[in-house]
Structures are given as structure tokens and as C-alpha cells.
Image: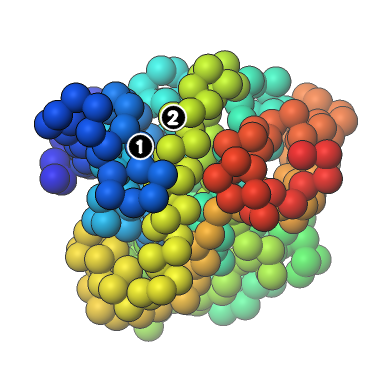
């Protein structure tokens, strides 16, 4: 069941709550017909997220009743971006949250007690859209321009990296912190000359601007990892619940691999994406559970970037092994954990 409510107490944000309930009709009877099905009490878990295509495994687990079969009630609370979702989780509004690895890097540099339990998607959806009538027809034209984005998210890293690779300093542009839902209005009004965001938020901007846009992919070959994170104390105090959540997502991963067209259709219906957008965005994502060395390397790279750009007072790259909780994924899908020391 899908229900929309006001999660953040701000009218511009809505929350999507879906509850998947497993009901014990006879004491001691298993909730699942699958091998090794769960037969204990139903437990609830709240996940803060953005509800986009990166959540495909969550949507499929719901559609295929994998959460129910593993004794879980799952509630999704929707936020403007992964940083807001993570802050809400740290503030007690959720048990887990969606975040890119960049957000965890920032939290680690603030010495927050936070753990990644898995990545469950990877994507290359972030791009830059500039107004041609503001003289932007090439990356070099960004010098001296005002660029809107959600500050503190991975979009800022990708912009900085894109500029650096093209010989431009981040100091050569003016960054304007804008909510993702307000990017289009800010660009149209002339408050900014360009915006940076993921494809879900860029798509309406491009539709609005028409032929007036300069569009450039921002990843430069480095995908973003969609991770599930929680406070270290909560994660370590709920190991079996985390295992059952990851088991549900692992089953969803197998379903997506076997039935990609059905999974795509289910996600499109869930998110009400039109055919054109769904066709363009689906190929930008990969859906699988993992904790791998590339995640650590990306986080180290991003930490160095934050330090060199004075976005933190810390001077040393953290040991990101301290921010990985691998026990649950190793139990559910052992081959998915490929991090030295884990």
C-alpha cells in the first residue's frame, strides 16, 4: 500500500510511506513458503530515502512480498536528497537512510558514528545543465557563472571534479545552495546560470528550457554508490533485522536479474515516470548488493577532495573500514563483500 504524507513538516516535501505487513495467523507457522523462511515476530523498520530509480531493489522487494516473507514492516520516508535523509536518520526520524558514499565521507570527517551496511545501486545520473542564452555552450564558459546545486551532496563533488579535469578551479564559479525541487525555477528566473543534479531533477529542467540548454555528464567515469546507512549503535544492536532486510533485497536483486522488463515496469508504475524518461534513466543504474574495494577508493578520493577544498577542518583521510558494517551482508551474500580487512 502506498500512502503520501507530510514527512518533513515542510509543504514542499512529501513523504511516501508503504507498509508491507506479514501476519502470523497461527502461532508457530512460518511467514514464508521459501526455503529457510522466517517464522519469528514481525519487526518494523523505517528507511529515509529519495524514492527514485536507485531504490529499485526496495520497490521489487515490496512488489514480490520479500519483506513480508522475511518478517518485516518497511516504511519509506521521502526526503529532498540523501544528505537530508541521512541527517533525519541521525536525528531519530528513521532507522536507516539512503546516502551516496560522498555523504558518508562528510559524516566521517565530522566523526559521526555511522555505518554503511551495503551499496544497493550504482549510477551515473549526475549532469550539468547551463543556459545557452547566458553564454554557456562549453565547460570553459562556466568561469564566473553562478551554479545551483544541493550543497554537501555528491553533486558538489562531481561538479568540482568536472571543473578540475577541465582546468577550472571551484573558486572560478559561484555555488548557490538550492533545493533540488527548486532548480528549474532558479534557472528560469536567472538566479543561477547553470544547475547540477541527478537526472530525475534535471529532466523537468531540460523539458522547461527546451533548446536553450547545454547538457554535460558530470561523473567523468566515476559512478555514485547508493548505500544504506545507519548509526553504528543501532546497526550493531539489530544484526538479525539487518540480515533479514538484506536477504529481502538480495532476493529482489535475483528477481531483477531474471526479470528486467517486469522490474522496470514495476518501478516506472511506482514512480509514475513517463516512457521517455524511464527509457533514458534505466540504463544509468546498476542494481546489486556489494561492499567492495572500489567503494573505499572512491571515499578516499572524495575525502582528499574535501580536505584540499577546505570543506572540512580535518587534515587526514579517515580509515573508512571503520564506517563499514560487513557482517550482515557477508552472512546473506558472502561473495558481495570484497574489501581487504573485512
Give how far across and how far down residue 108 sits, in percent: 69, 28
Quadrant holding the C terminus: top right
N-terminal of the two: label 1 or label 2? Answer: 1
Quadrant holding the N terminus: top left
Residue at x 13%, y 41% (from the top left corner): 3
Q: Which mark is residue 241?
A: 2
Distance (Cα) linking label 1 and label 2: 11 Å
Mark 2 is surrounded, within 10 Å at the Cα level, by few (under 14), some (14 to 19) or many (20 or more) other residues, namely some
**Looking at this view, is 332 or 204 the one in front?**
332
**Looking at this view, is 145 or 275 the one in front?**
275
Residue at x 40%, y 67% (from the top left corner): 256
Residue 190 seen anywhere in this rendered image of the structure: no
Give how far across and how far down residue 73 sits, in percent: 27, 33
**Image quadrant of residue 78?**
top left
Give how far across and how far down residue 112 sits, in percent: 64, 21
Label 2: state its secondary structure. Answer: helix
Residue 1 seen anywhere in this rendered image of the structure: yes
Figure check: 266 above or below 99 = below
In this rendering, which labeled residue sits more in front, label 1 or label 2? 1
- All told, the count of numbered labels is 2
Q: Which mark is residue 305?
A: none
Side of 212 where 268 appears, left or right: left
Figure check: 262 above or below 40 = below
Residue at x 58%, y 36% (from the top left corner): 328
Figure check: 141 above or below 298 = below
The type of colouring in the image is rainbow
Label 1: state its secondary structure. Answer: loop
Side of 148 where 67 appears, left or right: left
Mark 1 is surrounded, within 10 Å at the Cα level, by few (under 14), some (14 to 19) or many (20 or more) other residues, namely some
Give how far across and how far down residue 324 sits, in percent: 68, 35
Q: Which residue is mark 1?
A: 38
Residue at x 52%, y 66% (from the top left corner): 286
Amino acid at each position: 500500500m502506498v500512502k503520501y504524507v507530510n514527512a518533513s513538516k515542510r509543504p514542499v516535501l512529501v513523504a511516501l510511506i508503504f507498509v508491507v505487513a506479514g501476519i502470523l495467523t497461527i502461532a508457530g507457522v512460518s511467514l514464508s513458503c521459501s526455503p529457510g523462511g522466517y517464522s519469528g515476530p514481525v519487526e518494523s523498520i523505517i528507511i529515509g530515502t529519495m524514492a527514485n530509480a536507485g531504490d529499485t531493489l526496495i520497490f521489487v522487494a515490496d512488489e514480490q512480498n520479500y519483506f513480508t516473507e522475511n518478517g518485516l514492516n518497511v516504511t519509506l520516508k521521502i526526503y529532498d536528497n540523501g544528505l537530508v535523509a541521512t541527517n533525519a536518520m541521525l536525528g531519530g526520524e528513521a532507522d536507516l537512510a539512503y546516502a551516496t558514499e560522498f555523504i558518508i565521507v562528510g559524516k566521517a570527517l565530522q566523526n559521526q558514528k555511522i555505518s554503511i551496511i551495503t551499496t544497493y545501486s550504482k549510477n551515473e545520473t549526475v549532469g550539468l545543465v547551463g543556459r545557452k542564452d547566458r553564454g554557456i555552450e562549453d565547460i570553459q564558459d562556466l568561469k564566473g557563472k553562478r551554479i545551483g546545486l544541493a550543497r554537501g551532496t555528491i553533486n558538489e563533488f562531481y561538479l568540482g571534479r568536472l571543473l578540475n579535469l577541465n582546468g577550472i578551479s571551484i573558486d572560478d564559479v559561484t555555488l548557490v545552495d538550492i533545493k533540488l525541487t527548486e532548480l528549474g525555477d532558479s534557472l528560469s528566473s536567472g538566479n543561477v546560470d547553470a544547475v547540477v543534479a541527478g537526472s530525475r531533477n534535471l529532466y523537468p529542467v531540460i523539458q522547461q528550457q527546451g533548446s536553450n540548454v547545454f547538457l554535460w555528464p558530470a561523473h567523468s567515469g566515476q559512478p555514485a554508490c547508493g548505500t544504506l546507512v545507519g548509526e553504528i549503535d543501532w546497526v550493531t544492536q539489530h544484526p538479525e533485522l539487518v540480515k533479514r532486510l538484506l536477504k529481502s533485497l538480495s532476493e529482489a536483486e535475483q528477481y531483477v536479474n531474471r526479470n528486467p522488463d517486469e522490474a522496470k515496469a514495476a518501478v516506472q508504475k511506482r514512480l509514475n515516470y513517463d516512457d521517455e524518461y524511464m527509457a533514458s534513466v534505466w540504463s544509468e543504474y546498476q542494481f546489486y548488493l556489494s561492499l567492495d574495494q572500489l567503494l573505499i577508493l572512491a571515499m578516499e578520493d572524495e575525502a582528499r577532495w574535501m580536505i584540499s577544498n577546505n570543506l572540512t577542518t580535518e587534515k587526514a583521510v579517515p580509515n573508512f573500514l571503520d564506517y563499514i558494517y560487513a557482517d550482515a551482508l557477508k552472512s546473506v551474500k558472502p561473495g558481495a563483500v570484497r574489501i581487504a580487512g573485512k
